Image: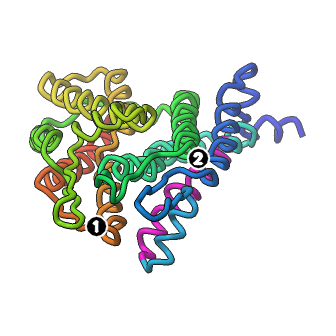
Amino acid sequence: MTRAASRRPQRLLDQHRGRWDIPTLALLALVLLAFGVLVPALTFVNLFADDTFSVLTGIQAFFESGNLLLGLLLLSFSVLFPAAKMVTIGVLWFARIDGRRRAELVRWLELLGKWSLLDAFVIAVLVGTVQLGILTQARAEPGIWLYLAAIVLSLIATFLLQPLVRTREQAEHHLPTIGLWLTVPGAVLYGAGLSLPLLEVEKCWFWENRFSLLGGTAQLFARGELPLAIALVVFVLIVPTVRFVGLVALRLLRAGDSRAIVLLRTIDKWSMVDVFVLAIFVVFSKLGAIATVVPRVGMWLLFAAAVLSVADSVLLQRARRA
């Protein structure tokens, strides 16, 4: 009986007594998520009436309009996966799970976690682009702030959990220099796409608005949409820039410091250019019903940068010591 009990995997709760920060963050994130998807998150203001959407009703509108793929995409990444992630963190903390399986689950939570911010970026771009004078405007509502807080808390909980489950097999080695053929062009395309227009929205020939990443972020700050603006600055501007610089430096210097590579991997998982680009495509589909939307060169530059970054991330995450 004693031997059998000794072979049973230990719970993280038993291994780290007194650590209640991770389950508390997961529970708080789950509560905020529940309110965040139900409370109004976006309002379209026009001459005739105001249309208000929550995260759930916004997803429902995609289904009702026949955009099943986008509806399923947003439902999965914005509602189902975040809820499942927070529940999984609780299970990992309180249940007896084999160490390798636990580490694998946390790795998947890290890799997929950033996609939960897709809906927040969609609303950020909508607020920045739908400013068509007296015809139509968009403003964020408290629901998106609650939703954004829930996703950030879940990212922090996963970040704190990861060092507690890392196995010895996850040690790192030198980053292959061949990755520079992905990192450098990706960085150049990303830098070029920051200030160039991503979308041009036009209605009734004389009302139009061009949206660029830098210009749209500045506009969000000017209008007092601080949570959305800060999310763009952190996850789409600062973190990707640090990621590009770090990858180039480690590859050119052929650095083998495992701590630096672990840190860079974490930064890579918080870099969200690819999520932002997908949000632009969702907005492109959403606005087609109320205005003429034209993609501009900045959108294609960021799209190319995102594709290269995803390929580069695969090399970074798969690096292992022989």
Q: Is residue 78 magenta?
A: yes
What are the residue bounds of the magenta stretch? 67-89
Dot 2 amino acid type = Arg
What x and y, as percent, mark residue 99? 61, 39
Asked if residue 179 shows in the view, the reply is no
Sequence-wise first label, 2 or 1? 2
Is 193 left or right of 82, judged from the image as shown?
Answer: left
Q: Residue at x 30, y 20 (%)?
A: 257
Q: Is residue 6 above or below residue 56?
A: above
Task: Identify the residue under disc 2.
Answer: 101
Q: Which mark is residue 291?
A: 1
What x and y, as percent, mark residue 276? 32, 49
What x and y, as percent, mark residue 1? 90, 40
Element carrying mark 2: helix
Determine which quarter of the picture holds residue 244. Answer: top left
Q: Where the C terminus falls, by quadrant?
A: top left
Instruction: Considering the whole magenta stretch, tell me its main secondary structure.
Output: helix
99 or 30, nearer to the observer: 30
Q: Is residue 218 above or below residue 107?
A: above
What x and y, as percent, mark residue 210? 19, 50
Dot 1 amino acid type = Ala
Q: Is residue 181 magenta?
A: no
